[in-house]
């Protein structure tokens, strides 16, 4: 009898522990709740509210990523120098959301803004997919429980919740983090979309003449550059009911120098680029301009200025602090029949042209890559085409003895190569000479050493192509 009683006691204890653990796991996997709407007043003596926007810091623990640390600090210093009243951070504070990475972020922020200065500005931040991720368990001895990641974000970014609604001088800022680190529409589920709709409705009811700023880490599908087929149709379906919405998205790191960084249809969408690295629209058949340092060394941010009659969006290079290109200007109240940054711009943009004296040269090259490996290849050089804005890429079509050359990668065969220019840079920093290296390891099978005819078509960011320039080249490796 005593043995049976003892086993019953052990069994009860085990069940209690399992129930307790199950409850703990459920608690940790359950997210925080949205914060209540907050009213703030910013000091705008000239009547202009200035809003600084940045994203994708991709920070690591202090001492492990000095370049990105410096980019973030300079971005904040730019906002401070420009008298920004509101700072919107659209997510990916960290590369992986360790406590040390967040501590580094807070250290940098606090080095620029004192406690008193922080109290005078409004901070609106959201999580990105990276902010839900951690390194391998054996590298950090942590499990990325949802509540832990969200609580850590709030602790180190001065946020009340991953979901906030802040009203500043009558302007509504809705900050909606994804609910997980998944990069698809499930991170904005029906419950979250309902909350967002309620906030937008409240903002429109407050003053239908003013823009409503809605910040998500991902952009709605098929709006700004590099949002094609990104699965976020649910955001688009929500926003299209409200012409007042100004969607602020991040994640893609797409260049702000691309005029497709702003889009207007039933509402307005803008993307943020990043203050870490820039992403280009690469495909398997794409080759990036040889001077690729601009991918890591071209952080950009935006400052929005709004005064009740007009919304102006100015792009800035972080490293120089200089404004880039003309601002995008939207008249208020927002009327979609008067939107100017629509897809119709593609029809009004002139195709690139070529200067006189065109020539193409090719030479074999050998160099050491960033990882110390020797690379042999063929470098093709030609003068950059001309365009009033930017030449994004060149389509290179090769023939040999009258027969077309094709390029097969995996299961896809291409009839040309796409040569991506340095268009992500400010115009004054772009090269007059295009250089593209075709690594022998990748291209020598399709393009063996020999004589070829190449036809080059220059394209703007909308895909409008020039007439071709044709030349005969001798490819060597």
Image (tube, grey):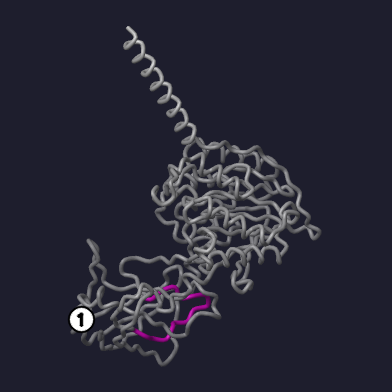
Residue name at image x 19 percent, y 79 percent: 403
Magenta segment: does it hold 184? no
The verdict on residue 381 being magenta is yes
- Name, please, the residue furthest toward the right: 45
Residue located beneath label 1 in the image: 448
Where residue 456 appears, x then y in whole percent? 34, 80
At 53% across and 60% down in the image, what residue appears? 342
Q: Report if residue 309 is visible in the image.
A: no
Q: Nearer the viewer, residue 71 or 178?
A: 71
Q: Is residue 247 above or below residue 258?
A: above
- The picture quadrant where one finds residue 287 is bottom left
Q: Quadrant of the C terminus?
A: bottom left
Q: Is residue 67 left or right of residue 280?
A: right
Picture coordinates of residue 332, whole percent (x, y): 68, 55
Q: In this rendering, does residue 415 appear at all?
A: yes
Q: Which of the pair 348/316 is nearer the observer?
A: 316
User: Over which residues does the magenta segment extend?
Assistant: 380-394
Among the 4 quarters of the image, the one containing residue 361:
bottom left
């Amino acid at each position: 009898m005593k043995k049976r009683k003892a086993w019953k006691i052990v069994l009860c204890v085990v069940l209690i522990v399992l129930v307790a653990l199950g409850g703990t796991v459920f608690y940790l996997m359950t997210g925080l709740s949205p914060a209540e709407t907050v009213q703030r007043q910013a000091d705008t003596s000239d009547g202009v509210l200035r809003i600084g926007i940045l994203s994708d810091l991709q920070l690591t623990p202090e001492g492990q990523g000095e370049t990105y640390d410096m980019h973030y600090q300079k971005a904040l210093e730019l906002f401070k120098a420009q008298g920004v009243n509101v700072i919107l951070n659209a997510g990916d504070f960290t590369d992986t959301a360790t406590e040390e990475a967040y501590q580094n972020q807070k250290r940098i922020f606090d080095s620029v803004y004192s406690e008193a200065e922080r109290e005078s500005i409004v901070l609106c931040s959201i999580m990105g997919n990276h902010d839900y991720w951690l390194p391998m368990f054996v590298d950090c001895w942590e499990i990325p429980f949802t509540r832990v990641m969200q609580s850590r974000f709030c602790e180190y970014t001065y946020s009340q919740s991953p979901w906030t609604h802040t009203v500043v001088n009558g302007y509504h800022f809705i900050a909606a983090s994804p609910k997980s680190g998944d990069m698809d529409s499930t991170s904005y589920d029906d419950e979250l979309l309902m909350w967002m709709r309620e906030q937008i409705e409240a903002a429109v009811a407050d003053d239908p003449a003013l823009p409503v700023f809605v910040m998500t880490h991902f952009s709605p599908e098929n709006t700004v550059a590099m949002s094609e087929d990104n699965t976020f149709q649910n955001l688009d379906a929500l926003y299209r009911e409200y012409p007042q919405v100004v969607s602020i998205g991040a994640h893609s790191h797409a260049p702000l120098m691309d005029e497709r960084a702003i889009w207007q249809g039933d509402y307005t969408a803008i993307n943020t680029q990043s203050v870490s690295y820039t992403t280009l629209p690469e495909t398997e058949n794409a080759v990036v301009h040889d001077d690729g340092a601009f991918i890591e060394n071209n952080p950009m941010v935006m400052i929005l200025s709004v005064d009740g009659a007009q919304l102006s969006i100015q792009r800035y290079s972080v490293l120089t602090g200089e404004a880039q290109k003309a601002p995008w200007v939207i008249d208020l109240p927002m009327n979609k029949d008067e939107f100017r940054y629509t897809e119709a711009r593609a029809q009004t943009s002139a195709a690139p042209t070529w200067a006189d004296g065109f020539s193409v040269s090719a030479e074999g090259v050998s160099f050491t890559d960033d990882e110390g490996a020797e690379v042999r290849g063929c470098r093709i050089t030609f003068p950059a085409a001309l365009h009033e804005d930017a030449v994004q890429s060149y389509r290179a079509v090769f023939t040999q003895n009258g027969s077309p050359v094709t390029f097969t990668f995996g299961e896809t065969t291409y009839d040309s190569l796409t040569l991506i220019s340095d268009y992500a840079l400010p115009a004054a920093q772009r090269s007059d000479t295009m250089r593209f290296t075709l690594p022998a390891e990748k291209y020598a099978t399709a393009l063996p050493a020999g004589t070829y005819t190449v036809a080059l078509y220059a394209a703007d960011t909308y895909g409008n192509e020039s007439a071709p320039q044709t030349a005969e080249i001798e490819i060597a490796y």
